[in-house]
Image (cartoon, rainbow, N blue to C red):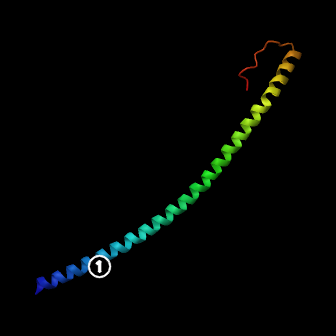
Amino acid sequence: MTASLRSVVEQLVATRVVAVETLLSTAISERDDAENARVADQVSIIDGELREHAVAAARAAALRDREMPAVRAALEAVRAELGEPGTPTTGLF
């Protein structure tokens, strides 16, 4: 009789342990899903900001490339007026 009672109690305990583990696993999974969604939102925001910075950098580079010939010509004119003809201007910008 004691062995039978012990077996029933052990089975009851095991069933409750499995139920609690299932609840904990579900709660942890839900928490992880919420955290993953929050992180994904933050990464999306950061990606957008990085894209904006990349576009701004590309625009600045394009503007620099368009204006560089005029800047170099002005620099050469100033150097010529200062009596520095032949001073190399390549590689300065």
Residue at horizontal 46 percent and vertical 67 percent from the top: 31
Tally the marks. Answer: 1
Residue 76 left/right relative to 29: right
Taking 83 as reference, is 17 above or below it?
below
Residue at horizontal 67 percent and vertical 45 percent from the top: 53
Q: Quadrant of residue 82?
A: top right
Where residue 78 appears, x then y in whole percent?
Answer: 86, 20
Taking 47 as reference, is 83 above or below it?
above
Q: Which element is circle 1 on?
A: helix
Q: Which residue type does callout 1 highlight?
A: Arg
Q: Which residue corresponds to mark 1?
A: 16
Residue 16 left/right relative to 33: left
Residue 1 left/right relative to 59: left
Where the C terminus falls, by quadrant?
top right
- Extreme-bottom residue of the structure: 1
Residue at horizontal 59 percent and vertical 55 percent from the top: 44
Local crowd at mark 1 within 10 Å, few (<14), some, or many (≥20)?
A: few
Residue at horizontal 76 percent and vertical 19 percent from the top: 89
Where the N terminus falls, by quadrant?
bottom left
Q: Considering depth in this image, is 2 or 83 the residue closer to the camera? A: 83
Where residue 11 appears, x then y in whole percent?
Answer: 21, 79
